[in-house]
Image: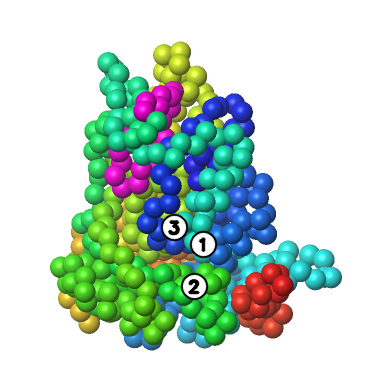
Amino acid sequence: MTASYLKAALGDDVALTLVAPGETAAPPDETSLGDLAQFFDVLQRAEEDWMPACDATYKLAVRFQDFSRPRHHFYLPFEQMPQADGFPLTEWWLRMQPSGRFDRDCFVAAWLCDAQRSPRHTPGPTPGQDAARPPYGYHLDAQALTRYLTAYAVERGVHHLTDEVHDVRLDARGWIDHVMTARHGAVDGDLFIDCTGTRGLLLRRALKVPFVSYQDTLPGDSMVTLRVDADMKAHGIPPYTAITAQAAGWTYSIPLLTRIATGYVYAQEYCTPQEAERTLREAAGPEAAGAPATHTTLSFGRSLHAWKHNCVAVGAAAGRVQPLQATAISYVHHALQQLAPLVAPVAQAVRSGGPHTDLQEHYNTALAQELDAARDLSTLHYLGAARQDTQFWRDAQTCPLPDALAQAIERWRVRPPGTEHQPGPKGLPQHAHTSILLGTGALALPPSTALSPLDDRAARQEFAALKQRAQTLVKTLPTQYDYFSQISA
């Protein structure tokens, strides 16, 4: 992903060498936030070019199930929050509660998700029919995406060594001089980009950058995953990632074109790996009976600095947050947006021996802020969960809170989160904190006193208009399964 983006963004201004092994064990499948289309815009790849190769489908929202009470769900969509008289519709909802479901009252996407609609019309004679479509992300096969982007990069001149780095050699200053590979020997460069995942082979191991753990605020240290071949015509293809609270954590379900990717993130203090696998198989249904399970351990946190000397980390080497929004691929995208404009000037500075600490600090600050904000948002799912039926969930609500989140919660007891609050990763809407608090149910949000002197006529009109717009789209948009069936015919 890194090599393809930098090659597309920088062209021949820099020479890129990609050191990566061949086919490895399949990584967990991915979902994105609502701005990943910008990544493919830089590559000048249309959805028709890359989605079929990656078994990809559309994602309008994340659906959270059983965080408040059994059989209760809510959506966190990418759609922006409508306003009435200058106030977010959620603040009016706290005062009026038209239907009792904030997501359907405030977002078109919730209606489309319940009806399993595609965000796009099938190609037809009506021009501009997709102009008002809601924002969306993607579900995709991570291994297939790696193959697609590697081929893209190589076709455009990236030098690809199918190999593994087994050692990192430093110069007298403590900077990286070269890496040693198993079959190609030494590979040198001006700037080294660490994409070695949670190993952090270059940044953490070789350059000794400390790791800042998030484990005290994010319960869960293990994961079991399944790749389930399924009859997607019978299942349908929901336009959302499903996250369901379980006794010792939560399961996820990612619908692709031809199968379902599913996993269980849990804490071994409350659940054995065997119990976790059994829970996941039961949740996945009979089609999962023959699917092999993959068990992994998890650690969450970030490198104290994502860039040190002539080494910069991207992805899990820089940091990793619980995948409650299932967005690791989007963190990589956002890091590359920050990094691409800096590569050429930094490489020149490294060659000439000049300073580049200001550029490093810009990158380090941006990544640290995004990952810390994403940690806070993930923590809110546990703190806000009203369920108290197992020890895991009772203990999860007593985990220590990051200082910034603790201070924000005290403000929210007076007024719901507003536009002044950083929502976490780019690509998530401003209402993310409000939607999670309203959906999980444990922290009651009060109606804003600022609305008291205002007439609610504009809000009633907005609620009615939104409902009408949603009902029209449900009638006119195809299901996701029908959409992909028609465009592939």
- Spot the residue most to the front: 183
Label 3 vs 1, first from the N-terminus = 1
Which disc is residue 327 wearing?
3
Q: CA distance from mark 1 to mark 2?
A: 11 Å
Q: Residue at x 69, y 77 (%)?
A: 477
Q: Nearer the viewer, residue 467 or 357?
A: 357
Label 1 vs 2, first from the N-terminus = 1
Give amino acid for label 1.
Leu
Q: CA distance from mark 3 to mark 2?
A: 19 Å
100 over 141 or under it: above or below: below
Q: Position of residue 441 (x, y in %)?
A: 35, 76
Q: Nearer the viewer, residue 48 or 32?
A: 48
Q: Position of residue 157 (x, y in %)?
A: 59, 34
How is the rendered protein coloured? rainbow
Whether residue 188 appears in magenta in the rendering, the answer is yes
Camera-near label (1 vs 2) is 2
Residue 411 left/right relative to 100: left
Residue 177 left/right relative to 37: left
Whether residue 366 appears in magenta in the rendering, the answer is no
